[in-house]
Image (spheres, helix red, strand yellow):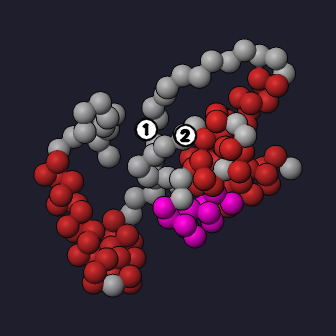
Amino acid sequence: MKQRFVRFVLALAVTAFLITPSLTFAQANPCAAKNPCAAKVLFRADWTDPPTIEHALHYVLNSRARRREGLRLAPFYAELVGYRWNEPVEFQKGLARAGQQAVDDFDRAMKQRLKQGPRPGRIELPE
């Protein structure tokens, strides 16, 4: 039951953001009007995959359950280096399937990223 709920919430959030890209988390969350804490960002990433999002949702739900049981929990900031599928040849095939503009846009973005260098404070690991 819990896993189905997590998948439902995930699907709902993704649908809301796909339909209205300018929608903020607070607007997508109907509880935000009643509870200002409901509009806080609990997860942020520059790349996401389903297992990472599922982990984040489970973590938040488990923390809330422990609080309901009476545990006093204080929030803290954490960073995580995640791993995603990375198959450059297949990725390039997908870009080609999307069209020349997708190929050009990605090439331009990668060149821009190389010019920027490492981001301050960011955890960087070799691939």
Q: Amino acid at mark 1?
A: Val
Residue reaching furthest to the front: 33
User: In this view of the protein, can residue 5 be seen by the observer?
Assistant: yes
The x and y percentages for residue 44 are 49, 43
- Whether 118 is drawn above or below 27: the answer is above
Left or right of 80 on screen, residue 9: right
Q: Which residue lies at the image location 17% right of the left edge and 44% below the top edge?
A: 117
Left or right of 112 on screen, residue 3: right
The x and y percentages for residue 5 are 79, 51
- Could you say whether the residue bearing mark 1 is in a helix, strand or loop? loop
Question: Which numbered tag is attached to residue 81?
Answer: 1
Is residue 66 a member of the stretch shown in magenta? no
Nearest to the observer: residue 91 or residue 109: 109
Nearest to the observer: residue 103 or residue 127: 103
Nearest to the observer: residue 45 or residue 96: 45
Left or right of 70 on screen, residue 40: left
Q: Which residue lies at the image location 27% right of the left edge and 84% below the top edge?
A: 100
Residue reaching furthest to the left: 115
The x and y percentages for residue 62 are 74, 32
Q: Which residue lies at the image location 39% right of the left edge and 63% below the top edge?
A: 87
Q: Which residue lies at the image location 21% right of the left edge and 40% below the top edge?
A: 118
Q: Which residues are magenta?
A: 12-22
- Whether 72 is drawn above or below 7: the answer is above
Q: How far is mark 1 from mark 2, CA to CA?
A: 18 Å
Question: Which numbered tag is attached to residue 41?
Answer: 2
Q: Amino acid at mark 2?
A: Val
- Whether 109 is drawn above or below 27: the answer is below
